[in-house]
Image: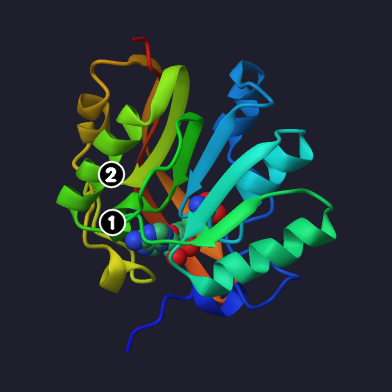
Amino acid sequence: MNIPFWEETYKNDTVFTFGSEPNNTIVEFQYLFNKTGNILDIGCGDGKNSLYLAKEGFLNIDAFDISENAINKLKRLSQKNEVNINASVNDLCSFRFEKKYDLIISFGTLHFVKKDSWYKFILNAKENTVVGGFHIIQLFTDQIPASFDIAPFTVGLASDGEIKELYSDWNIIQYKSYVFEDEHPNVPKHLHASNKIIVQKEK
Ligand SMILES: C[S@@+](CC[C@H](N)C(=O)[O-])C[C@H]1O[C@@H](n2cnc3c(N)ncnc32)[C@H](O)[C@@H]1O
């Protein structure tokens, strides 16, 4: 059975699988977010973004991932950093919203489920966001083929710009379409095509 490369580094607390720095869009726009608002991190992995927000004083962070190794690691790292993150094992295809969120983030995750599943998830997430709330979504597109490290798991690549269409009724604060070079522990350099969007619910 094929196991994604990140499962190995999720067992190791001394290395961040996807880098230790938070995504730059979070840093750039964090001034817009309410420190007491409800935040949800979808496919949080070993939690670089949730940990950053928690260390910056954001108080109500839920984070989930399908990987038990990821969630166990994030729980250990939260304890070590003396921050509170409500981390749980969940599949975004069956996730049930139990509250409304002020900020929902997802980096590098949606393309690992089929397109109809992530569409359904986004529509559901939009419903479960307060008016004035934000989403930041980054996912890979089929502008170039999936790289060798993730190809077996990449079942839902977006078309370029598709994510923008899903948010055409929200205020699009920033949208980017780009190709970037990536590298992970024990995985050589490779390219991904990506869309990233930050949007706000207006009504
Ligand atoms: C490339 S990693 C990104 C991790 C993190 N968001 C970051 O930016 O560092 C993708 C993550 O998506 C998770 N994932 C894949 N399918 C998932 C699903 N159906 N539900 C929840 N998480 C999923 C994987 O376990 C993995 O941790």
The three-letter code of the residue at mark 1 reads Cys
Residue designated by label 2: 121
Residue at horizontal 15 percent and vertical 49 percent from the top? 116
- Residue at (55% x, 36% y) in the render: 39
Q: Is mark 1 within 8 Å of ligand 1?
A: yes
Mark 1 or mark 2, earlier in chain: 1
Residue 24 is labelled as: none
Q: Which residue is mark 1?
A: 93
Query: Which residue is painted at 22% across and 29% down in the image?
Result: 166
Residue 46 x/y as whole percent: 60, 61
Picture residue at 54% right of the left edge, 60% below the top: 88
The CB of the residue at mark 2 lies under 8 Å from ligand 1:
no
Q: Based on the displayed image, in which of its 4 quarters is residue 164 positioned?
A: top left
**Residue sitting at the far bottom:** 1
- The color scheme shown is rainbow
Q: Position of residue 37 (x, y in %)?
A: 60, 27
In the rendered image, the quadrant that contains the N terminus is bottom left
Assign a secondary structure to mark 1. loop
x%, y% of residue 175?
38, 24
Between residue 201 and residue 5, name the one nearer to us.
Answer: 201
